[in-house]
Structure formats: C-alpha cells, structure tokens
Amino acid sequence: MNPSPLPPALVETSNTFARGYDNLHIERLLQITYANDCPPCFRSIHDSQAHLPDDALELFPCLFNDDFALISEGQFIPDELDECCPSTGLVRQVVYSVTGEMLNERHHVGDLYSREEAQALVHRLSFDTGHYSRAWEISTAHLTEDALRYLEHRAGSLNAGATGLLFEPFALRDCNGLGCKLIGTPWTDENLMKMEGRPYASLRQEQLDAGTPEALVNLLYLAALANVRLLIFDPDAAVLDGLAIFDE
C-alpha cells in the first residue's frame, strides 16, 4: 500500500504549534562600510584572524569578499588571501549575531554588541532541554467526534501505549480532558529515520491503518513537527488560532 500523502495544509511551512528556537548559534560579524552610497555589509572574520579581540577589529580598515573579511592594518595577510579579497572598507563595529532553527529553517533572532550579551540572550531563550516549550493545552473543539471517541478508547485501554504509533493517550478525569504523550519528536524524516528507521509517510500510514482518525493524525503531526511532547485537550481551554475547529 502506498503511504497516504500529506494534505496540502500540512505541506505548508506555517505551523501554529511552532514556538521558540532550536540550535541557537552565535556568530561574530563585522559591520563594514565601503564606497560612498552603499549600505553596510556584514562579514565574518577570516579564521586566520579569529583570535583578534573586538578592539583590534573595530574602526580598522579591511579587505573583504563575499565570504569573509581581513583586517589590513597591522596584520600580515598572505598573498593568496589578499588576491581573493577585491573590496576594501572600514569595520564600523563588531556584532554578535544570534540565529536559531524553527521547523528546520534557520532564522535571525537578533544582534548584540558583546559576546556576553549574546550568551545571556541564548540562555534566556533556552531551557536545559534546549527547547523553549514542549507542552500545550488546547480546546477539545480541535477534535472531531471520531477523534474524541478514539482517544477516550485508547486512554482507557491497558495497551494505550503499546501500539508503536509514537503517541500515547491518557485521561484527565477531574477536568474531562484527554492528553497525548508524543514520542520520538520531531516527526521529521531525518529524525524518524535515525530513531525508527522509517520516514514520516510510513508512520502516518501506520497510524491511519490502525484506525486513528485522519483529523487527529494531522493535528498530532503539526504538534510533533514543532517538537511538542505533551498535548492536552481540555473542553475549557482556549482554541488555538490557525487550527481547524470542529465543535463551536
């Protein structure tokens, strides 16, 4: 049987569950001005001069190309490097650029003006797990009747977590809620191939073949793709903008 294709809405890059950044990274960059009317450009310092402190970079003339820059005053530059840097400019300031990944795409978070400030920002955006948030509480309005009955049945079964579908339902009796523990997140092909030896399309088909309602499969995929680990459905919780609503 061919794997069931993803619905068009799930192929889009937008994901309302996505929060925070993974793999936060700090890069030291030089802000360079050159020519008269050209806007400043940003380049990393070449590895051969990476040991230079910030005050040996700022307000010094430089050579640069599309990939890196070299301080040209008071520094020895080999001929082969000099020849591959056709442009000249002035380093106005050193910035520490912070970038992070969201849904496997790298995004610019911000620029700081010292390594200590950049490290403090990364610390504030990170927990020990490396993820900003991994638990959500959303309205049961995002579940179809079939999905609600399915979760209630699985949550009440002694084998709720023994199906190998990479999610384990559980019941919250006091609030008439239901929850799902998502396993092996994120459900990207790369991660699932590493952990399970199969792409997401195979997992999706196995979930559908096991009788999981498609609306629930789609919702769990979005959550797992954003590295959510605990998903709570509560009738009194707020709806999540961007998700389909089945019960007004």
Image (tube, rainbow, N blue to C red):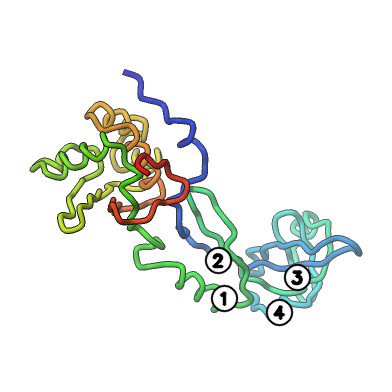
Residue 148: image x %, image y %? 24, 40
Distance between the alpha carbons at the discs numbered 4 and 3: 9 Å
Distance between the alpha carbons at the discs numbered 2 and 4: 20 Å
- Tell me if residue 20 comes above or below residue 178 in the rendering: below
Distance between the alpha carbons at the discs numbered 2 and 1: 8 Å
The mark found on residue 56 in the picture is 4
Q: Residue at x 28, y 48 (%)?
A: 182
205 and 115: which one is in front?
205
Q: Are marks 4 and 3 in contact (CB under 8 Å)?
A: yes
The mark found on residue 115 in the picture is 1
Q: Are marks 2 and 1 in contact (CB under 8 Å)?
A: yes
Q: Secondary structure at mark 3?
A: strand
Mark whose residue sits in front, 1 or 3? 1
Badge 4 or badge 3: first in the primary sequence: 4
Amino acid carrying label 3: it is Ile
95 and 50: which one is in front?
95
Label 3 CA crowd tier, 10 Å (few <14, some 14–19, many 20+): many
Question: Mark 2 sits on what residue?
Answer: 26
52 and 34: which one is in front?
34
